[in-house]
Image (cartoon, grey):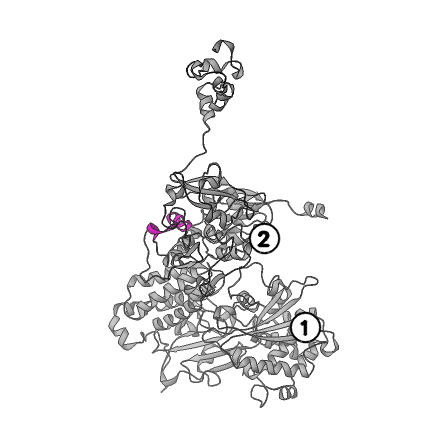
Amino acid sequence: MAEEVKKDAPQMFKVTIDNITVEVAPGTSILMAARKVGGDVAPPTMCFYSKLKGSGGKCRTCLVEVAAGSTADPRPMPKLVASCRTNVMDGMVVKSITSEKVLDARKGVVEFLLLNHPLDCPICDQAGECHLQDLSYEHGKEETRYEFQRRLFEREDIGPYIQLHMTRCILCYRCTYIADQITNTRMHGILDRGEHAQISTYISKAIDNDFSGNMIDVCPVGALTDRTFRFKQRVWFLKPLNAHRDCDKCCGKVTIWNRGDEVFRITARKDEWGEVEDFDGKTGWICNTCRFDKKKTSDWVIEGPRKISRHSVISANHYLDDLKRPHETIAEVMGGRKPKLLMDIHKVSEVNKPTVHLSEIEGPATGKVFNKDNGKLLPEAK
Amino acid sequence: MSTKLLLDKANIEGIRFYKAYRENGGYAAVEKAFKMTPAEIVEEVKKSGLRGRGGAGFPTGMKWSFLAKPEGVPRYLVCNADESEPGTFKDRYLMEFLPHLLIEGLIVSSFALGSNRTYIYIRGEYAWIPDILEYAIEEAKQNGWLGKNILGTGFDCEIYVQRGAGAYICGEETALIESLEGKRGNPRIKPPFPAIKGLWESPTVVNNVETLAAIVPIFNMGGEEYAKIGVGKSTGTKLISACGNINKPGVYEIDMTISVEEFVYSDEYCGGIPNGKRLKACIPGGSSVPILPANLLFKTAKGETRLMNYESLSDGGFATGSMMGSGGFIVLDEDQCIVRHTLTLARFYHHESCGQCSPCREGTGWMKRVLYNLEYGKGKLSDIDLLWDIQRRIEGNTICPLGDAAAWPVAAAIRHFRDEFEWHVLNPEESQVRNFGLAHYADAREVAV
């Protein structure tokens, strides 16, 4: 059966986004296809989160123009469509940044999103890794035309770990999807409607769930912040490190954010779209124990520095390009010869031999000594 | 001469109850339709050319034929009685005075679509109507028109009345379905359309009250006969709820061949403008359609007489035309201020926006505030361009049509009455005292004294 279907229908759909053609599997959204192309072509997203089922379609920043619906029906779509929730068809032609209409609509959406946003970036913990900040730098205007009082809410502590700052919220609904999909119970949701809509717990109930901390990770703005990290440090001063520990609740693979020896905060590992990475086919959500309670370097096995690939302030102070391994450089300098690292030296040198007194060893090791005969210590070195 | 198909029996005493309704030829459509197959019924509706009466005017037969029919999955028919559009009250009249007409239409439609459980989602503010409908359903059940094995065809059908909680947005079909499922009434993102995945992930058809009631005359007289009434693609009769500055506000049934001028001035319908005033502007199809000034209302831009039907009212697009919409006919006389009127509408849409997608959530409030400033003498000339820019960026960029509905009245008001906005800016003090706008748009007809 399956064989026959394959023969009839093309295996992959060809879709052209901004004059770049990619092949994607049927059922892929335009947005995911555009992300495959990457770069500026990928529309910005504020509410869509590929790891959360049902998310997207709300913020309207990912609007694109469909210039031709498919090979079979090449009519253009009359309205701009939300690329995160529209699936590709074979032969579809999509315009993202090449369309004036799209850029104009995107500018409009940024303006709408910023209308009631307090723009308190200087005192906001999210600043530097805020998606709204990035979006407004890229697509927004430098001034607002809104002359009225902005919507204000009281800050609210929901549970011991999370603070809700509703004034900053852009109502992307991501946190409610988190609660629906990865925790057992949802204790918060959207109250009221329209401009008055707010994320809230039912009668200020505390959110107490092992995975509730992931709400902080998915929040695109500073509406949900980590109470254990509030006002401790600006994110761009922290050094991200990949680390893991054995956790019985979650995958235990995290990014720890250090300054010196001190661990300031712990987040899940996020990819270049700001989404939590997959490990072995499962999304790497982390539990609250890992996130809030294990704040000592000794709790973690550090794997190495983490490269933040997002184009944002947060990556300003970090590892911009791929790390250059020292041996590559040395090999270059040494004309392709394999160097000996200190560990190797110790293995073969007499330093590790307690029978030999240190003073008997002559001076620092030199290439003359170690480069011969694949590192075996030669008799004349003595 | 007007044809009356829906309201012809409305004045019979006791028509609200089963006995009088049955004695006056009620439930004949059910008897007739149950002798046909569901496919034949859909074909008959297609032949009649009936178009959705809720506002969009989509052909009903076509909508029914799109309904997916997978095996082992129930199908649902939902009657959209969440009539909340300012200026529209035709469904209320139908349900209040002719509940059995709706029930009869629902039984036929349920049979055609294979819906064993049919829902009437009724606006929460119509607090007294659910009781009327439930009483009528009970009567129909006792007389064997509902329940198990109706008329020996083996078809089971139950009708449930569900009260809304007072949100305009729940009149949008996917928001209505969400609300019916017990969730927050947010519109869904389409596709999938309700015809594929609607209520409880099952194929669903959502139709307006008047559409479903119109099924009854279609089967009483035959689809082809029905199609002969009206002009072109506007077949049958339409209920118009007229209100505003007219002598006789109320619900009128028209056969879509009469002109707008006749509708406004004829004694059979609105009966003219009271107090010898002149007509200034009119919203022909409920608050969300563009407003038309008097000079474009009676004649199209091409100089043809404008008729009360789908095509003629939308002639000229939005630049010089409007829409049939849901049939809420609001008339404004020369004393009415367009700015104030637009503010009222903007306030409504701001209040009713669900807050799901950002252009509508933030934009409606912004438009309201700018309009408020204009109306109360605090506006600037640049605000008018700003309003235009805001509405342009809302329209077409939202999930559901509420964004469009909020943008169109503002756009049309600025398009046709820009100098009235300017007058408000330039004469802030006078606009406070007079509280009505410029009168020179008023139609050139002589004033009858």
Amino acid type at mark 1: Phe
Seen in the image, is B103 located left or right of residue A40?
right
Observer able to see residue B290: no
Residue at left 59%, top 50%? A27
> Of the residues tagged 2 and 1, which is closer to the observer?
1
Nearer the observer, B307 or B101: B101
Residue at left 70%, top 62%? B71
Figure quadrant of the N terminus of chain B: bottom right
Looking at the picture, how far across and down is residue A257, in whole percent? 42, 42
Residue B111, which numbered label? 1
Inspect the magenta stretch and tell me whether residue A123 lies in it: yes
In this rendering, the answer to whether A20 lies above or below B22 is above
Label 2 in the same subunit as label 1: no
In this rendering, the answer to whether B88 lies above or below A32 is below
For the magenta stretch, what is the residue range? A118-140
Query: Which residue lies under the disc numbered 2?
Result: A73
Looking at the picture, how far across and down is residue B299, in whole percent? 43, 73
State the image quarter where residue B201 is shown.
Answer: bottom right
Nearer the observer, B169 or B294: B169
Amino acid type at mark 2: Asp
State the image quarter where residue B60 is shown.
Answer: bottom right
**Is label 1 in a helix, a strand or a loop?**
helix
Inspect the magenta stretch and tell me whether residue A74 lies in it: no
Real-space Cα separation, disc 2 to disc 1, in angstroms: 34 Å
Observer able to see residue B306: yes
